[in-house]
Image: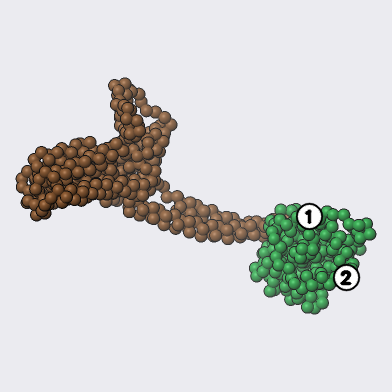
Chain colours: A brown, B green
Amino acid sequence: MFEWIRGRKWLPSALLAAILAISTGTADFFLQGWVALIISLFLTSSVVFARNLSWVSVAIFTVGSVAELLFRITPVLAGLSVAVSVAIVAWFGSVKQRRFALGAGIAAGLAVTSSACFSSDFLTSVYGIHLYDEGGRFFAFMFGSALVVTTNVTFFFLGRLTFTQYTHVGTSIDRQVVTAEQSKLNLELAEQNQRFSIARDITDLIIQRISTVLTLAQGGNYASKVDPAAGGRALERLEETAREAHLELRRLYDMLNRSQSVSSAPLGIENLDTLLLEFRQLGYSITLRHVGDQFQLSEGANLAVYRIVFEALENIRENAVIGSDIAVDFMWANDGLQVLIKDNGIEASNRQASAKNPEFVSEYTATDDLKALVEPISGVGITAMRDRAALYGGTVEAHLVPGVGFTLSAMFPMMRTLGGSSRSDK
Amino acid sequence: MTKVLRVAIVGSDPSAVFGRELLLGSQSDMKVVFLGSSLEASLQPLSSLTFDVLLLDQVLSDSTASGFIRDLGALLCADDQELPPIVVTAPFHSKRLEVDLIDAGATSLLSLEQPAEDLLYGLKNSPEERYNFDLPDLLESFQDSGSPSLTDASFLGVVYDLDEDGRALIANLRAQALNTPLPSSSALSASKLKRGVRDLVLKLGLHTSKQLIYRLWQAGELG
């Protein structure tokens, strides 16, 4: 599920908001009428913006709560949406947004609770609860306040818990990748041990043969001085033994080369999951997306693309702060492939700086725009990437997006022709 | 007239044995009297054969050199015969292997890293080499090869029951091993010490001086 959420910025929140709108909106409509339905829909809309526009979300549920007070609408069930919005802001928002959302959620809830207990007869008219004196109203207010605080705080920590799971612990898919990788390594290790054992046996045989060659050479050398015919006999045996040693060496050579080709299958796009997992464990929010019909690449092209992505990610790791968002997108066309690697390292860095120092100004200037346009990005890494891409008729472009981060694009307009595999497409 | 050294050769690789035969056959003072390929095929014939030295390959098809020496020693001992000098050859030199062979009763270990002259010299000199020893070198090899294995309890009993001369000999060896001086009245000269060790080897039914020193080191008698 995390993978699905990672890959879509608006849809998950919109779906959640729709579910809340249908369930709580319907209940509010039947309990309190049209005005309650409108306020209910307004409150649930805060969920839609909670992830990407946290301040808007907080503003919406604050305004919605004020509307409840103004229209003397008794607490609507859609108040639950406020807690859900608090949870989502706690998951995705900055420190300041999180704290503000929690405070606003509790304040709005307390205001509505206070109004309901002391200024109206909603409990009787809507829910059939009678409060006979001030003591009863006070008790109801205390109970309602405790409910508001508890609900908001619980949802806040649920949001933080999900953030921890999402960013640092990993999803079940991540764990599956780790398990699969571990099993693969265990198997390779077992195979290597087996081959090592065979290599040791063959080496023992070779040592034995070479020892015999030496012994024969020594014997022949001495014997030929006394009896030249003995030298000939020694040479015959010497040749025979040397040939046997050569044969064993050939076996060892074949086995070592076979094990090399088996154990070091070239890396490719299919290995990116493991790479992405490493980045998630480091604390980056990273996504991988394939758009279009993927086609099979040859081993060389697959490795070249993998290395380009690898180098780009390494560069991000060196320059972008922990917590940055990274997107790796593969756009598959009929004949071509484009790989886009984007990060918001500058934005994340500014966000963190402003959270620590409220006076920090994160705006970028026209000079930044100009630099991004006219100053080419160069270096050993980018040159190596360009060389790799050129092998398959590709180009690599990297540029700075002022105030956001870096974007690297590798274009292979004729990848299917130059780097496609002869095997059938996936 | 030069005395001819009768050599028995045992090795699992027929070509290697052939090479040894050629080498020794080229020497006028050596004669190959037996060629064997395995423990099973060689043990009985050797127990009834008269030879001066056994040239044994470390790798045999059915045993190792130390196993072969122990079995041959046991067989000859049962017939009240003495184990002849044994020169073992191996592809490489190894201190652990050397100590294992000393423990079994081999006279010397020669590797193929050494030239053929060393092998010929080792064979010709093996009767004397049997009672030669260089105590500091031996102790270094023993220590490098790791902790001593458990000592044979019967050997401890024999050492305990040694007469005064035997105890004096061990005291001299211990003083040399620990580099501590002995009173001049108790100190033995190098030749007397060597001769004393030889006598003790024969008395205890061992095969070489190195073997005796190894057993004493194992028993903790040398410090």
Q: Nearer the viewer, mark 1 or mark 2?
A: 2
Identify the residue shown where x is 22% and y is 43%: A106
Q: Which mark is residue B191?
A: none
* Contact (Cβ within 8 Å) of mark 1 with mark 2: no
| x then y, percent, for residue A39 | 11, 43
Identify the residue shown where x is 84% and y is 60%: B173
| x then y, percent, for residue A146 | 23, 49
| x then y, percent, for residue B12 | 67, 66
Q: Chain of mark 2?
A: B
> Disc 2 marks which residue?
B163
> Disc 1 marks which residue?
B137
Identify the residue shown where x is 70% and y is 73%: B41
Secondary structure at numbered mark 2: loop
Q: Is residue A182 above or below residue A91?
A: below
Q: B119 or A53: which is nearer to us?
A: A53
Q: Earlier in the sequence, mark 1 or mark 2?
A: 1
Of all residues shown, which one is farthest toward the left?
A34
What's the residue type where badge 2 is placed? Asp
